[in-house]
Each structure stands twice: as C-alpha cells, then as structure tokens.
Amino acid sequence: MATLACLVLAGCASTSPQPFKEQDVDAQNISDRQKASAQSTPVTGPLSLQEAMARALKYNLQQRVRLLEEALALKQLDVNQLDMLPYLLAKAGYSSRDNDRLSLSRDIATGAVSTTQAVSQDRTHTVSQLGLSWSLLDLGIGYYNSQQQANRVLIASERRRKAMHLLMQDVRSAYWRAASAQALQEKVQKTIEAAEDALRDARRVEQARLRNPLDSLRYQRQLLESLRLLESINQELSSAQIELAALINAPVAERIEVIQPNWGKPKSKILALSVTEMESLAVKQNADLMEERLNVRNAVIETKKVLARLFPNLSFSYGVNYDTDNFQVNNRWNEAGVQLSFNLFNIFTADMQNKLAAAGVTLAEQRRITALMTVIAQVHLARLGLVNATAQYNRSEEIWQTDRKLAEHIAKREEAQTQSRLERVSSETSAILSLLRRYQALAQAQIAEARLVATLGKDPVIGSVDQLSLFDLVQAISAAEK
C-alpha cells in the first residue's frame, strides 16, 4: 500500500516542459523596455562628447552588468567570511509508532532470557537540540576561500575597468561618426539631388537623340557611379545615430543632435612619453595584466587549500538536548565533544593533489608572462597606430583641401557655362568623399589615442559613477581630459 502511494505521489510530482506563453513574453518585453528606459534620463539638448561618455558610463546596460558583477563579488566575499564562524544548528524532531517499544533482558551469568516484557520508550515523543560545532579545517578552508574571493572582487574591478575603456572607445567612434553624418548630411543630399536632376536631363537628351547615344550613355554611367558613391556614404553614416543611442541607453528611434567637435588637427600629449615610459606604465596598470596577477595569487592560495585538506581535522562540539520521552530519567542534558578525524586516502592522493595544484600555479604564471609580453606588444602597436592615424589625418586634410578648391573652381566654371554638370557633380562627390575621409581619419586618431590610453591602464579620475550626478560626471570627464 505504501509503495502504491509513493508511485502515485511520484506520478503527480513529475514535470513536463512548459514553454513561455506569447502574452507572457510580450508583457515581459514591455516591462524590460520600461525598466531599461527608466535607468536613464532623456537627452534634452545637443550632446557633447563628454556628456555622451558620461551617459554611457552611467546608463549603458552592459556597463551596469559589470557594476552588478562587482557588487555581487563583494557580497560573496561577505558570505565567505561568515564560513569561518562556528556552526550553530538547531534541531527538532517528532517520533510516533503504532505499538509500544518492548524489550526483553538476558541474565549475563546464566544466559537465561527473562519472559517479562518492558516498555522502554513512549509511543510518541519529541526531540530538540541546539548544538554548536567548530572545525579547524573548515576555519582554514574558509580563510583561504575568503582570500580568493577578495581577489575575485579585484578581478571584477579590473574587468569593469577594461569594459569602461572599451565603452569609451566605442562612444568616441560612434560620436565622431554621428558628427560626420550631421555635418555631411545636407551636402550629400544636395549633391544627390543635383546628380538625379542631371541624370533626368541626360535621359531626356538620349530619348530626343540630341547627342551621340554612346556619349549620352557614358555620361549617365558616370552620373550613376557618383550616385552610387553618394548613397554608400549616406548608408555608411546612417547607422551612427543608432549606435550612439544604444551606447548611451537612449531611445534608438529618436534623433540625437550632437555638438560639432573641433575638426582641427589632433594634438596628443601622450606621444610626448617615450616608449620605455609607456611600457613601464602599462606593465603596472594594464587591466588584463592585473587580472592575471590576481589569478596567480589565487592559484597559490589553492595550493595552500590542498595542503590544509591533507591534515587531520580537529572539531569541537557542544549541544543542549531535550527529549519528552517519559521513560528517560534525564530528559534534559548537555554534551560536549572533541573529534579528531583523518581521511586515510589522503596518504595515497596527497602527491597527485599537490602536483595538480602546482600545475595550476605554473599555468597561471605562464598566462601572466604571456599577458605581460602581449601588453608590451600592444603598447608598441597602439603607439604606432596613433602615429599612423595622425599621419593619415594630415594626408586626408591635404586631399580634402585640394578637392575642395577643385570643386569650387568647377562650380564657378559651370556657372559660367564652360563646364558640364557632370564635372560639377563628380567634383562635389569627390570633395564630399574627401571630407568624409578627413572626418574618419580624425575619428581614428581620437580612437587610437583612447586605445593607447587604455593599454597603458590610465583611468580618468572621475569617482563613483553611481554616486555622481550626470552633470558632475560630465564635469569630471571634462577635467580628466584636460
């Protein structure tokens, strides 16, 4: 009967896959979007680069995840520290049987068994206990676990630093692209309209057979090529607004007006440092290298934990007990104990465990050495990238100035009816493309500088992102960039 009851209960307790209902998914999506929007303040005016970076640091959803991971690691540290405390365990139980617990006795001298049956326990009784236990092994392991978790808190902080650097790089890139799109949009649109007008005129000329068909088709082909180039520029710039809005956690459907930055020649103070100075800063401050150092520290602590587990465990206990059984003479009693235990298999596995822990330390140290050499290489690459980006900007500036002057001359000649509209459209397209390349080269120079700063591990001194208001955070970022 009991078996049947167990089978019935097991059948009732079985579970089956429960897919999400469509209305539940819709409601959850609406709730999540509202929560994401509630975490940021609306953009009410033109956006500066400093405000964009401040909004990204304060409201970006991925950055919020990093902050929460660091907070979770810190809370886990508090929990691990509690593991070093003694265990205080309270127990309560209830026992019942359908007949008396009877017992017989045997005379030790004669071996005769008494026929008298005695009740030795109440049919129903309750037992309660409050016990305190403390293990030296648990204390040692808890201490080492707390040390490792403290290092994990620092690792989470280093990962947040790295995420912050990458986020600021992405914001710079999206901001400069959005500024380029905003600056070029009107020029691109006007040139597209002029090219389409010229294309319509060329097709009318072709239909009227006023020109050689081959010349007319070549003319249209060149106009179409200019239009394709202009439309590709437009498409290239159109996504910058969405990317910037996503980075600062703003509604992606709303247009963001950015303050036009200084389009002058980039001036980097960081290039004043020698390569040796850059290497010295990077090996001290780089987030990836700091993380690997902390991993080595945790691997060394792991060897200590393995060694601690090999020792005998000494535990102490003290408890207060109470039993309602009327057949017990003493219903209340206190008991204390000391126990020494040792896992005999540790004798056979100690060598393997020590070798495994030592291999973990060796691996962590090799990763640290690899990270060190990688960071040094990144310093040289980032510095070279900044030098090359600055040189590319200078060359793009010269090309744009030349194309701009050429477009102005051709426009004047077209007004004087000595130049075709095709030449004007082509020259203006080339000028727009050169200006776009100039903007891109300047943006790449800014990004290259930010990448070098991140490689060196130089953090802007801006304080706590959560505690600072948006205005104070903007001021702090502006001061850090000076």
Image (cartoon, grey):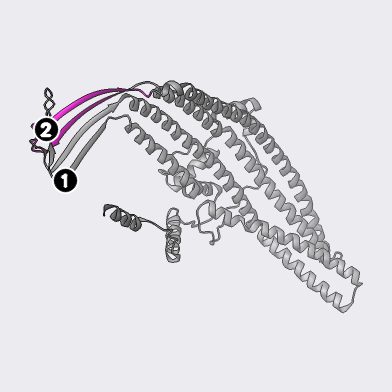
* Residue in front for this viewpoint, 1 or 131: 1
The amino acid type of the residue labelled 1 equals: Arg
| Placement of 326 over or under 211, stated as above or below | above
Identify the residue under disc 1.
Answer: 97
Q: Give the range drawn in magenta.
A: 315-343
| Placement of 116 over or under 200, stated as above or below | above
Evaluate whether residue 60 shows in this view: no
In the drawing, does residue 214 fall left or right of residue 223?
right
**Is 340 one of the magenta-colored residues?**
yes
Say which residue appears at 64% left-offset and 32% top-offset: 379
Residue 53 pos. (x, y %): 53, 46
Q: Is mark 2 on a helix, strand or loop?
A: strand
* Residue in front for this viewpoint, 355 or 36: 355
Rounded to the nearest angstrom, the CA distance separating label 2 from label 1 is 23 Å
Figure quadrant of residue 14: bottom left
* Mark before the other along the chain sequence, 2 or 1: 1
Task: Rate crowding at label 1 as few (under 14), some (14 to 19) or many (20 or more) other CA atoms within 10 Å.
Answer: few
Q: What element carries label 1?
A: loop
The amino acid type of the residue labelled 2 equals: Arg
